[in-house]
Amino acid sequence: MTDFSHNKPRAIIPALEPLWNVLEPLSPVIIRVTTGLLMVPHGAQKLFGAFGGYGLEGTAGWLESIGFVPGFAFALMIGLLEFVGGLMLTVGLLTRPVAAAVLVFMAIAVSTHLPAGYFWNEGGFEMPLMWGLLALSVLIRGGGKFSVDRKIGYAF
């Protein structure tokens, strides 16, 4: 039996292999920064009513309507996680604790969206699941080489 565990696959387009080798270390950074930056507007919706959001009062009312009481506390917590936590993920500060908080939040979000099915455009759990898996990936990897965590010398 042949052991394929140590064999590197041959590139279909060999001329691109040097490019992939150079860019490979940036892959975790792309995931972390994109996850963080794309969370920030969601937090701004909840905290400030930006981008067509409902602000703290509207978000609190909605959260209470689905059973999260006190709604204001949950709205503030979620808004801060998305806004401030998103910025922290972007720069890689306290990366693992923030990613863990996002993962827990998204697990709860998945459970609240389960009754609507899979597809996000129908209110389903597709997007919270994806956000949760991205957070899990960041949690596993940590801040990485290009992060404030690395700069200050701590891997949380």
Image (cartoon, grey):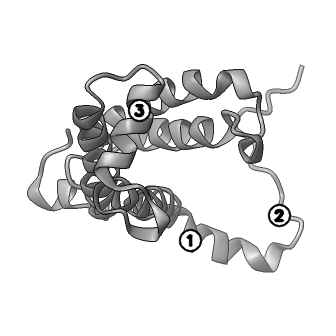
* Amino acid type at mark 3: Leu
Eye-nearest disc, 2 or 1:
1
Is residue 21 shown left or right of residue 140?
A: right
The residue pinned by badge 3 equals 63
Q: Secondary structure at mark 2?
A: loop
Sequence order check: which comes first, mark 3 or mark 2? Answer: 2
Of 103 and 10, nearer the camera is 103
Q: Nearer the viewer, residue 50 or 104?
A: 50
Which residue corresponds to the image point at 69% horizontal and 39% vertical from the top-left? 123
| Sequence-earlier tag: 1 or 3 | 1
Amino acid under disc 2: Ala
Mark number, residue 11:
2
Q: Are marks 3 and 2 in contact (CB under 8 Å)?
A: no
CA distance separating discs 3 and 2: 50 Å
The disc at residue 23 is 1
Outermost residue, left direction?
152
Q: Nearer the viewer, residue 100 or 124?
A: 124
Please say if the residues under marks 2 and 1 sit with CB atoms less than 8 Å apart: no
Query: Do the numbered discs 1 and 3 sit on residues whose CB atoms are within 8 Å?
Result: no
